[in-house]
Image: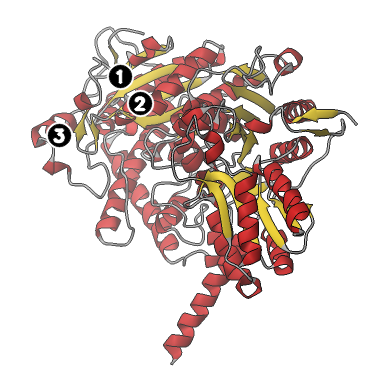
Amino acid sequence: MPTINIIQAVNDALRAEMKRDDRVVIMGEDVGKFGGVFRATQGLFQEFGSDRVFDTPLAEAGIIGCAIGMALYGLRPVPEIQFVDFIYPAFDQIVNEAAKMRYRSGGQFTCPMVIRAPSGGGIKGGLYHSQSPETYFIHTAGLKVVMPSNPYDAKGLLIASIRDDNPVIFLEPKSLYRAARGEVPEEVYVIELGKAKVVREGEDITVVTYGAMVRVALEAAETAAEEDQFSVEVIDMRTLLPYDIDTVIASVKKTSRVVIVHEAPRTCGFGAELSATISEKALLHLQAPIFRVTGFDIPFPYTFEHHYLPNETRILKALRDGMDF
Amino acid sequence: MSEGLVGFLDPEGKVLKGQKVPSLNRKDLLRLYRVMLLNRRVDERMITLQRQGRIGFYVGSMGEEAAIIGSAFALKPKDWIIPCYRELGAALLRGFPLFDLCCQLFGNEQDAIKGRQMPNHYASRKLRFGSISSPVGNQIPHATGIGLAARLTGSKDVALVYFGDGATSEGDFHVALNFAGVYKTSTIFLCRNNQWAISVPRQFQTASRTLAEKATAYNIEGVEVDGNDILAVYSVTREAVDRARRGEGATLIEAVTYRQGGHSTSDDPRVYRDEKEVQEWLKKDPISRFKSYLINDGAWSETKDASLEEQIKDEIEVALKKAEKIGPPCIDTMFEDVLDTVPWNLEEQREELRASQEYESVQQDR
């Protein structure tokens, strides 16, 4: 089985779906001949031609607005937003149009499309190449929100997203694009949306996380096992909307302690939703407060990005606070 | 960009000197007239209904019937209409039943969109008549996307999108025209310049001399047409449709017209505009103009008109009466169509609502 990175896994998934379904069309800034600024669409223009893979004018609202029309017509557009930080001009189109099309037309019209966007920090990108805005989309009825943490999941989740009949926001953790490598089968496979994965089993405490933080959480779990003899369970959410509550609650009932980790800011972040739901469904199983290790409630900083992002130390501290409570 | 306002008829319905009207057969001419009159009478009836408190809201299109119906008539049934919220005439022309309209206005159990939207926000997949949203201008790039998809798949379908003069100030208008220019999409952008965006007059939207001239910057065709002359609107739209089908790209049509009523039932236009201006435009009313033309042409008479009026009145009353008796949709449908399947959180919330209703009825029984 070849070992590849997330960029290659995304490229693999796109190629496979374009071969399978000629309704799949890729569009965005620099996605054509150049293959995307992160190279995610490399070679696709050359392989499938300019009617299937094409560059767009530099206007996110136009990219998504146009993609909605194409989806209404019966195509399966996969628009790329170059950095998720630049998605806001298209916010109205995503939230008021794509997300509501099925509901407001009584199911007559739908918008099956996958909006791919690199997300998150850790690449010295400062305020505008580092944001984690998943909450805005998780808060919007009518969307699915997906974020892989490794190449295997990236391929399977992207294929599932393209085949899904709903608009999907597919957030790719850009700090892992080349850093995360793993074995990925050459054949086509699907990872069902809405299913989390227990990536490390444990008995004492649960870490719930996703995207680039999965790796950091796993490292913290290893250290906690070695230094503190804690048995830490780590859950990779993978799909953030609709999210897999059953896997989370089952784990909480087993361990009775929870740390939620994400790099997005804390207030009203996805961790707030998870924390509230865990409290509603499993309060009497809890032995400690639910801890959150997140980005701070500030714009994403440049010089101090590694102090902003949750790191092993901060997660370890939360694990120890949770266990000592 | 073609120069000057295209028009064939004077306000009295006489053919202007040197102009030749498009050759349409009598059946088509009378069909157009019927839909215009139906559109007008439905609007008047529904506004009364709103005043009586029987429906919550209504958006009329009085004065703009020629711009709406004349343009839609230039399409084939397979072509797409992407409406704003004032294009009832285009839906009626395509055969949207009055009963379906009334069900939508009441938001009842037979409403195709299950009581989910305000009045006038209907949709019909069957008629290729798009789903209506309220934010201004959002629908414009969708028509670019449809026109692009048609081109990419080798289809001759075109998309006609409607919007008002106010929408030309929105970013979505500009990105839509820009993309359409770049990709030569099969799209017709029909701007109903009705002179008013709620209370804001046309000159506060743009310093441009005309709205049609905005096409020039995007290198697509721009045409300014007398929007109260249905034959002229049909003719310029037909030319735009033919150009699109030949692969020659998109057209922006500015139909110069007038909103005779308020923006909706929620505003009183007497507060913000001069009655003299309204009176001037009423003299150019598109329906009476077309009626005079048909009578001059020997295709129509006052007797026939009176009987058509009766017929339309009955049709509206029958549909209204039938629709008003129907109750609301099942409350469970509120949680459907968010996604293709109902996820666990919505199942839970549906249960929560059921439980609260049961709780309420237990409390009332006490």
Say which quarter of the image contains residue A47.
top right
Q: Which quadrant, please, contains the C terminus of chain B?
A: bottom left
Q: Which quadrant, please, contains the N terminus of chain B?
A: top left
Along the polypeptide, which appears first: circle 1 or circle 2?
2
Q: CA distance from mark 2 to mark 3?
A: 20 Å
Label at residue B191: 2
Label at residue B278: 3
- The local secondary structure at tag 1 comes to loop
Q: Which residue type carries mark 1?
A: Leu
Question: Which chain letter matches label 3?
Answer: B
Q: Which residue type carries mark 3?
A: Val
Residue projecting furthest to the bottom: B366
Locate residue A142, reporting x and y percent: 56, 48
Question: Which chain letter matches label 2?
Answer: B
Crowd class of label 2 (few under 14; some 14 to 19; many from 20; radius 10 Å): many
Q: Which residue is mark 1?
A: B211
Which residue is at 57% across, 21% downward?
A: B148
Which residue is at 26% across, 41% downward?
A: B263
Q: Nearer the viewer, residue A132 or A44?
A: A132
Along the polypeptide, which appears first: circle 3 or circle 1?
1
Question: Which chain letter matches label 1?
Answer: B
Q: CA distance from mark 1 to mark 2?
A: 8 Å
Q: Which residue type carries mark 2?
A: Cys
Tell me whether the residue at label 1 lies in contact with that at label 2, contact meaning CB atoms closer than 8 angstroms.
Answer: yes
Front: mark 3 or 1:
1
Say which quarter of the image contains residue A306.
top right
Q: Is residue A203 left or right of residue A74?
A: right
